[in-house]
Image (cartoon, helix red, strand yellow):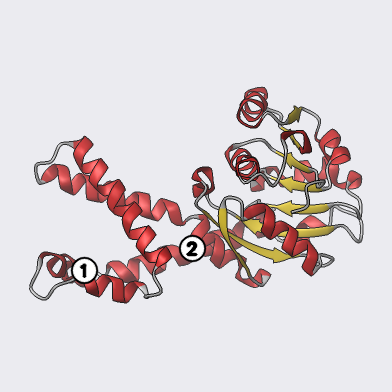
Amino acid sequence: MESHVRIGFIGAGNMATALAGGLLAARVADPEKIYASDIDEERRKLFARTTSANVCSDSSAVVREADVVVLAVKPRQIEEVLTEIGSALEERHLVISIAAGITTEYVEKFVRKGVRLIRAMPNTPMLVGAGAVGLCRGKWATDADLALARSIFESSAVVVAVDEKDMDAVTALSGSGPAYFFYLAEAMIRAGVELGLNKEDAAALAAQTALGAGKMLAESDRPPEELRRRVTSPGGTTEAAIKWLEGAGIADSVVEAVKAAARRSEELGREA
């Protein structure tokens, strides 16, 4: 990302703060080139303390200052925000929406022709610089716009570019995905406690196991099936656990759960 690019966040919540923090940590942006607005004063104060960037309560002021405008609000807030700032967005702006389920076509109804739009689906591990993000282009966005959006998110995430028809799948897989792993960790901790460990030790072991397994998966050129087989010795403890999971149909349940999340993403788009 070029150093002169000014980035404005409409909404100064956790995701906006994480993204701004990633840009600053990677030294691809300076605090004076970052702006944020939020109706919540405490959110603005936290964003300012965390990033030393510019904050205000007026979203239109952020739009005037920024070259890239990130819509970092909840899906239920998107219509109100776009009604407020849509007419202020110009062809010079690149707009990046991270509102789950909200299509580029929907956002483009509120802006003038030629305003370039990128839809993004980040996830919460961006807060620790280990996120995953899916991107797709709107009607007027160019390859250069996609590259700029990628450079912004790559400061704190792995980025993939997909067709918009696949964004609900991205939302279900990686957007909601951290919760699936937290849910599994909860169960592992509970099992450890029931087997006699104290909760603190069980939690530490579960967290480090998740971290190590994720690191191996991300850094290995082997598929998860093979990594799993390498841990699963015939007749051993891991095999006993995997057989039980297979017998309980856990894999099919996970697939159906992710599909349920994708359906809800589609519904959010229709409800907007």
Say if mark 2 contacts mark 1, CB within 8 Å.
Answer: no
Q: Nearer the viewer, residue 173 or 28?
A: 28
Q: Give the quadrant of residue 180.
A: bottom left
Q: Give x and y (percent) for residue 108.
A: 82, 58
Would you name the residue on which mark 2 appears?
Answer: 173
Q: Where is residue 127 shown, x and y percent of the image?
A: 52, 43
**Residues at marks 2 and 1, CA–CA distance in whole angstroms:** 24 Å
Q: Earlier in the sequence, mark 2 or mark 1?
A: 2
Residue at 29 percent of width and 48 percent of height: 208
- The residue lying toward the viewer, choosing from 266 and 85, is 85
Q: Is residue 165 above or below residue 15?
A: below
Assess disc 2: are there few (<14), some (14-19) or many (≥20) residues with their C-alpha within 10 Å of its C-alpha: many
Q: Residue at x 90, y 61 (%)?
A: 114
Horizontal relation, residue 74 to residue 63: left or right? left
Q: Which mark is residue 44?
A: none
Amino acid at pointer 2: Leu
Q: Position of residue 100 (x, y in %)?
A: 62, 54
- Label 1 residue SS: helix
Residue underneath mark 1: 231
Residue found 65% across the figure and 63% down from its top: 135
- The quarter of the picture where the N terminus appears is bottom right
Q: Name which residue type carries label 1.
A: Val
**Is the residue marked by circle 1 packed among few (<14), some (14-19), or many (20+) residues within 10 Å?**
few
Residue at screen point 72% across, 46% down: 71
In the visual, does 144 lie left or right of 229?
Answer: right
Determine whether 156 is above or below 148 in the image: above
Q: Is residue 203 positioned above or below 270 on the image? A: above
Give the percent coordinates (x, y) of residue 34: 75, 38
Front label number (2 vs 1): 1
